[in-house]
Image: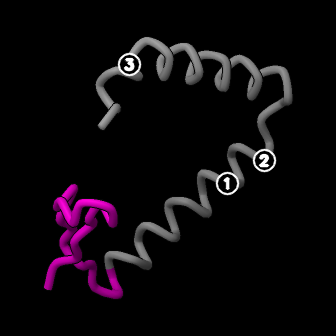
């Protein structure tokens, strides 16, 4: 089964997603949990540097994501 994302104003199909099974979901949750613990131990200064880098990339590539 697949899931569809549609623009509610135009009914345009934006994206189709394949449904995940329970094992796939559990694997993702475990990875996210591990990453959370790593992020939690990261200093605020290092987090700020990473977030500034992410913001810069988003600004550079924002035109790629505009609909």
How busy is the neighbourhood of tag 3: few (under 14 within 10 Å), some, or many (20 plus)? few
Give me the disc on residue 61.
Answer: 3
The one nearer the camera, 50 or 1, is 1
**Residue 11, percent across and down?**
21, 66
Disc 2 and disc 3: Cα gap in Å?
28 Å
- Say which residue label 1 marks: 36
Disc number at residue 40?
A: 2
CA separation in Å, label 2 and label 1: 6 Å
Q: Cβ–Cβ below 8 Å for labels 2 and 3? A: no
At numbered mark 1, what does the secondary structure look like: helix, strand or loop?
A: helix
- Secondary element at tag 3: helix
Q: Vertical placement of 39 versus 19: above or below?
A: above
Q: Which residues are magenta?
A: 1-23
Residue 14 magenta: yes
- The structure residue drawn at horizontal position 16% and vertical position 78%, both measured from the top left corner, is 2
Quadrant of the image containing the C terminus: top left
Q: Position of residue 37 (x, y in %)?
A: 71, 54
Question: Label 2 crowding class (10 Å Cα cut-off): few <14, some 14-19, many 20+?
Answer: few
Q: Are marks 2 and 1 in contact (CB under 8 Å)?
A: yes
Residue that protrudes farthest toward the front in the picture: 9
Q: Residue furthest right?
A: 44
Q: Is residue 21 left or right of residue 48?
A: left
Mark 2 secondary-structure assignment: helix
Q: Earlier in the sequence, mark 2 or mark 3?
A: 2
């Amino acid at each position: 089964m697949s899931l569809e994302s549609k623009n509610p104003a135009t009914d345009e199909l934006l994206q189709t997603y394949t449904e995940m099974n329970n094992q796939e979901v559990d694997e993702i949750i475990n990875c996210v949990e591990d990453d959370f613990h790593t992020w939690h131990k990261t200093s605020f200064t290092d987090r700020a540097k990473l977030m500034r880098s992410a913001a810069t990339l988003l600004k550079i590539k924002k035109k790629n994501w505009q609909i």
